[in-house]
Image (tube, grey):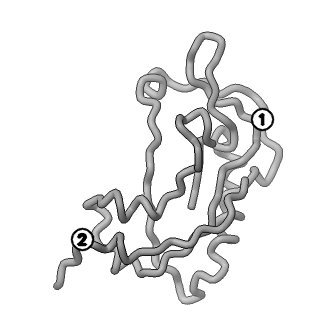
């Protein structure tokens, strides 16, 4: 079995991004404050993850709409992810459950998963193209808790 390398792949990968859209919960959600744990207070970082799935027989022509619809439904149960991070009067990081929504960007890459190679051996240049960075955002208070591309 031939092993694939991530070397120079990033130069070949091109990702075309659509316009970012806010995806709100499918139903009304509580409008309250969600207090984060002490661990969340001490480790307030952005976690960038990539999940890869092969499409089924139907293909992936409407994958963006399917993901947005599923996200709307999930946000009803995980509604703090549709809110915004803020600082409480005590100086603690909290989530204001506003229901504004998660940020979703439909994107398409010009390669297959096999061409990307082993994503367990991160290549920031390659994998960085597969996650969305909010232009101008300099800290976690300037972005929704959930951003999906």
Left or right of 67 in this view: 133:
left
Left or right of 56 in this view: 71:
right
Q: Where is residue 42 in the image (x, y as percent from the top left)?
A: 42, 23
Residue 65 vs 110, above or below: the answer is above
* Residue that badge 1 annotates: 30
Q: Nearer the viewer, mark 1 or mark 2?
A: 2
What crowding class fits label 2: few (fewer than 14 Cα within 10 Å), some (14-19), or many (20 or more)?
A: few
Task: Please tell me whether mark 2 sits on a helix, a strand or a loop.
Answer: loop
What crowding class fits label 1: few (fewer than 14 Cα within 10 Å), some (14-19), or many (20 or more)?
A: few
- Residue sitting at x 65%, y 12%: 89
Residue 76 vs 11, above or below: the answer is above
- Residue sitting at x 69%, y 38%: 83
* Residue that badge 2 annotates: 7
- Residue sitting at x 28%, y 61%: 120
| Of pointers 1 and 2, the one earlier in the residue sequence | 2
In contact (CB < 8 Å): disc 1 and disc 2: no
């Amino acid at each position: 079995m031939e092993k694939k390398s991530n070397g120079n792949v990033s130069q070949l990968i091109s990702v075309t991004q659509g316009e970012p859209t806010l995806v709100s919960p499918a139903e009304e959600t509580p409008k309250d404050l969600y207090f984060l744990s002490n661990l969340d207070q001490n480790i307030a970082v952005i976690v960038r993850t990539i999940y890869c799935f092969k499409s089924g027989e139907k293909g992936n022509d409407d994958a963006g709409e399917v993901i947005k619809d599923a996200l709307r439904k999930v946000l009803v149960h995980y509604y703090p992810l549709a809110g915004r991070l803020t600082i409480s009067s005590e100086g603690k990081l909290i989530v204001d459950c506003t229901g504004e929504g998660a940020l979703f960007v439909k994107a398409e890459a010009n390669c297959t998963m096999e061409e990307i190679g082993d994503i367990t051996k991160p290549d920031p240049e390659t994998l960085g193209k597969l996650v969305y960075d909010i232009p101008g955002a300099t800290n976690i208070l300037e972005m929704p808790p959930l951003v999906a591309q």
